[in-house]
Image (spheres, helix red, strand yellow):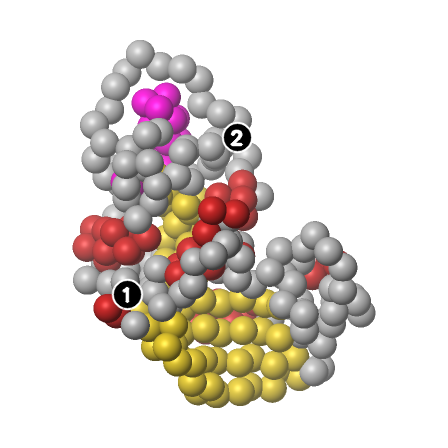
Amino acid sequence: MKPYVICLMHASLDGRTHPSRWRPKGAGTDWFEKIHDQLGGDAWVIGRVTGSEFARGKPYPETSETFPRENWFARRDAKTYGVVLDAQGKIGWGRSDIGGDPIVVVLTESVPDAHLAGLRGEGVSYIFAGKSGIDLALAVEILNRELGVKRLLVEGGGVANGAFLRAGLIDEFNLILSPAIDGARGAPFVFDSAEEDSDKRAPLTAMTLDSTRDLGGGVLLLRYLIQNDRARQ
């Protein structure tokens, strides 16, 4: 079964997501974690680039061990899981949780055994969702079936958000909009794509503004409900 998927992002008025670049500085930048908690997800998911910002370790050493390409869980009893898309197994974690939420890495079957040994040694759970590229629909189905995830928060970066959008998996979009502007090249957007996906369009057929919440100081929380063309998924 597919979880209910909510994309939560915080952006400037020009859709950029690095608050350190915004002007004026500090415009509503303390709201993301508050709204994240209020949405009450069973898990949250980020892409490899964002996930690397939390990593403390180095690439795992070679091993003579071999492992089946089967899902492996260090824990199944957490209230919330931190899910990271890492198709080729690039991140050496050096930790087993982010903010107390156990890490679950989404891999492809092409990852080396050394990486699986490293994840197991650090108590980092992992699932397989494709042979060489991640099948997001399969990944969220596994999270629901194996860990009971019914409500999933998609929280960037832009490439990961865009992949979920193009896969037709996002049911709701919550945007914290700050009265600030980036105004220069080079910063990531709320939704983006890798070069190979630049011509692909999302099967999105409608967006309905469900609510607008004034958070104070000119900061707004916009909640949109999304409809997707299921026939194109």
Residue drawn at point x = 66 percent, y = 84 percent: 216
Say which of marks 1 and 2 sits in front.
Answer: 1
Residue located 49% across and 74% down the image: 174
Q: Give yes or no for residue 137 being in the magenta stretch.
A: no
Residue 165: name its quadrant. bottom left
The N terminus appears in which quarter of the rendering? bottom left
Q: The disc labelled 1 sits on which kind of residue? A: Arg
- Mark identifier at residue 57: 2
SS under mark 1: helix
Question: Going by the picture, which residue comes out furthest to the front?
Answer: 199
Q: Amino acid at mark 2?
A: Gly
The label shown at residue 232 is 1
Q: What range is drawn magenta here?
A: 112-128
Name the residue rendered at 76%, 64% in the picture: 183
**Quarter placement of the C terminus:** bottom left
Tag 1 and tag 2, C-beta contact below 8 Å: no
| Residue 127 is inside the magenta segment | yes
Left or right, residue 150 beside residue 224 = left
Note whether 76 is above or below 10 in the view shown.
Answer: above
